[in-house]
């Protein structure tokens, strides 16, 4: 959406506005005006509810993987018991959680064991993303503040999972670089933006901000206008030149 022209974005907003109570009309207008690309963007806003499932290149996740996910969640609970703190799933008939794929909150002391199990026993061999959230206002576990999020992908079945671990302020999380070497830079970014340290990381230093930058800009307590301007280039670490 952000890469579309201003006129294209305006058309999408116009389609949504005039078809707010008439989705069929919105559908036809979008297809007639600028073809499938804009039509699909309008589809995302169906009924103005972003929690409505939308098809991906693999189809509807819930229809394709609902039964698989259910079996996998039962296996996780059976294998790890109380170490699984919470499971939210999109396939419940009576009470649907507002998630697009199974989201599992795990105990920190079992994080590596659970991720290894998912990788080696369930085929979630690809770590697609590693990020964090500052949940200062609504922590998922009392006494915690941050949530580190791991998005996993099964290359063979195309199914996905989301794993979370909650941390208190200044609490370290175990590095997953031993499982996925690609987590190296992702963990550095989380450290840079939030100040979360990863125990066992081979080279934990800033990756986006200047090494002289003070603080971590995506924390909720970082000043909104906390600009830091450096008038000289960042000094080069002599160790990196060896």
Image (cartoon, grey):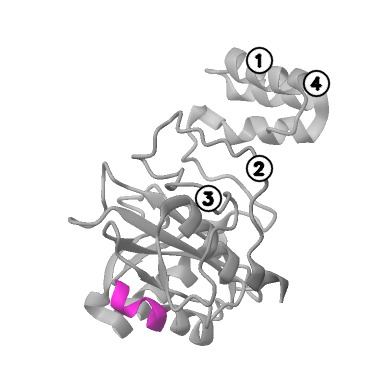
Instruction: Identify residue for label 3.
Output: 212
Residue 5 % position (x, y): 78, 25
Circle 3 SS class: loop
Q: Is residue 184 above or below residue 24?
A: below
Instruction: Identify residue for label 4.
Output: 33
Between residues 25 and 120, which one lies in front from this camera angle? 120
Numbered disc in front, either 1 or 2 = 2
Left or right? Give the position of 14 relative to 70. right
Residue 182 % position (x, y): 62, 72
Circle 4 SS class: helix
- The tag earlier along the polypeptide, 1 or 2, is 1
- For the residues labelled 1 and 3, the Cα–Cα distance comes to 46 Å
Tag 2 and tag 4, C-beta contact below 8 Å: no
- The tag earlier along the polypeptide, 3 or 2, is 3
Tag 3 and tag 2, C-beta contact below 8 Å: no
Instruction: Identify residue for label 2.
Output: 232
**Dot 4: few (<14), some (14–19), or many (≥20) neighbours within 10 Å?**
some
Which residue is at 52% across, 87% downward? 120
Between residues 21 and 105, which one lies in front from this camera angle? 105
Numbered disc in front, either 2 or 4 = 2
């Amino acid at each position: 959406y952000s890469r579309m022209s201003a006129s294209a974005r305006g058309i999408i907003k116009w389609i949504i506005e005039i078809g707010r109570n008439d989705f069929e009309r919105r559908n036809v207008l979008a297809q007639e005006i600028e073809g499938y690309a804009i039509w699909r963007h309008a589809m995302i806003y169906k009924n103005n509810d972003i929690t409505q499932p939308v098809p991906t290149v693999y189809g509807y996740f819930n229809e394709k993987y609902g039964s698989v996910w259910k079996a996998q969640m039962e296996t996780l609970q059976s294998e790890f018991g109380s170490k699984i703190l919470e499971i939210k799933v999109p396939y419940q008939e009576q009470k649907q959680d507002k998630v697009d794929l199974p989201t599992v909150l795990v105990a920190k002391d079992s994080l590596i064991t659970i991720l290894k199990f998912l990788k080696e026993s369930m085929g979630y061999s690809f770590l697609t993303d590693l990020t964090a959230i500052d949940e200062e206002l609504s922590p998922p576990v009392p006494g915690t503040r941050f949530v580190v999020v791991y998005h996993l992908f099964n290359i063979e079945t195309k199914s996905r999972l989301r794993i979370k671990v909650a941390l208190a302020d200044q609490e370290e999380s175990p590095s997953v670089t031993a499982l996925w070497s690609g987590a190296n830079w992702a963990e550095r970014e989380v450290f840079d933006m939030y100040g979360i340290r990863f125990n066992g990381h081979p080279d934990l230093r800033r990756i986006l901000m200047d090494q002289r930058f003070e603080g971590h800009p995506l924390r909720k307590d970082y000043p909104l206008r906390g600009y830091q301007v450096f008038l000289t280039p960042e000094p080069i670490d002599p160790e990196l030149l060896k």
